[in-house]
Image: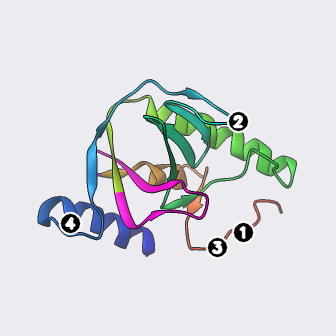
Amino acid sequence: MLRHFTLACVLTSTLTGANFAIPTRIQQARFDYCFTGGGVNCVVDGDTFWVNREKVRIADIDAPETHQPRCPQERTLGNAATRRLHALLNAGPFRLASIDRDTDRYGRKLRIIVRSGQSLGEKLVAEGLAREWDGARRSWCT
């Protein structure tokens, strides 16, 4: 439910100019991987990446950890999510849409990635590589 509300706000703000979620300029770059430290246009894991020297956390999903995963299953799924996000970001231009909060507690920009009206985070969820962000971290280990 939260996912649909948030995406609706993103799309609505595009049409009405509402302040809840503000789409930013179109992004397009060639993304690499960056597993440690800062980066320029690179993917850290399944829900975090750098674009134009700015670290972004995908606001509408939670992906499995690749840095200090809690079990082999989380590591495997996290690596698959990371590879898929890398492919999605390299597939063409996208927009970064703001949500009601600008940054998380680690200083990462909280954004929803939108291409052709669809959240790329939602796509990762549909493919089983992430889950909707509900405000709480839950284990990926069974």
Mark 3 vs mark 2, foreground winner is 2
Q: CA distance from mark 4 to mark 1?
A: 30 Å
State the residue position of label 1: 138
N-terminal of the two: label 4 or label 1? 4
Label 2, secondary structure: give it: loop
N-terminal of the two: label 3 or label 4? 4
Is disc 1 in contact with disc 3, using a CB cutoff of under 8 Å?
yes
Q: Position of residue 54 (x, y in %)?
A: 47, 42
Is disc 3 in contact with disc 4, using a CB cutoff of under 8 Å?
no
Q: Which disc is residue 136 wearing? A: 3
Q: Position of residue 130 (x, y in %)?
A: 60, 55
- Hey, what amino acid is under mark 2? Thr
Q: Is residue 118 magenta?
A: no
Residue 115 in the image: above or below residue 21 = above
State the residue position of label 4: 12
Residue 116 in the image: above or below residue 112 = above
- Hey, what amino acid is under mark 3? Ala
Point out the residue furthest to the left here: 16
User: What residue is at 19 percent from the left and 69 percent from the top?
Assistant: 18
N-terminal of the two: label 1 or label 2? 2
Q: CA distance from mark 3 to mark 2?
A: 24 Å
User: Which residues, given as a range, are shown in magenta?
Assistant: 98-117
Label 3, secondary structure: give it: loop
Q: Is residue 116 magenta?
A: yes
- Hey, what amino acid is under mark 1? Arg
Q: CA distance from mark 1 to mark 3?
A: 6 Å
Q: Which disc is residue 36 wearing? A: 2
Q: CA distance from mark 3 to mark 4?
A: 26 Å
- Hey, what amino acid is under mark 4? Thr
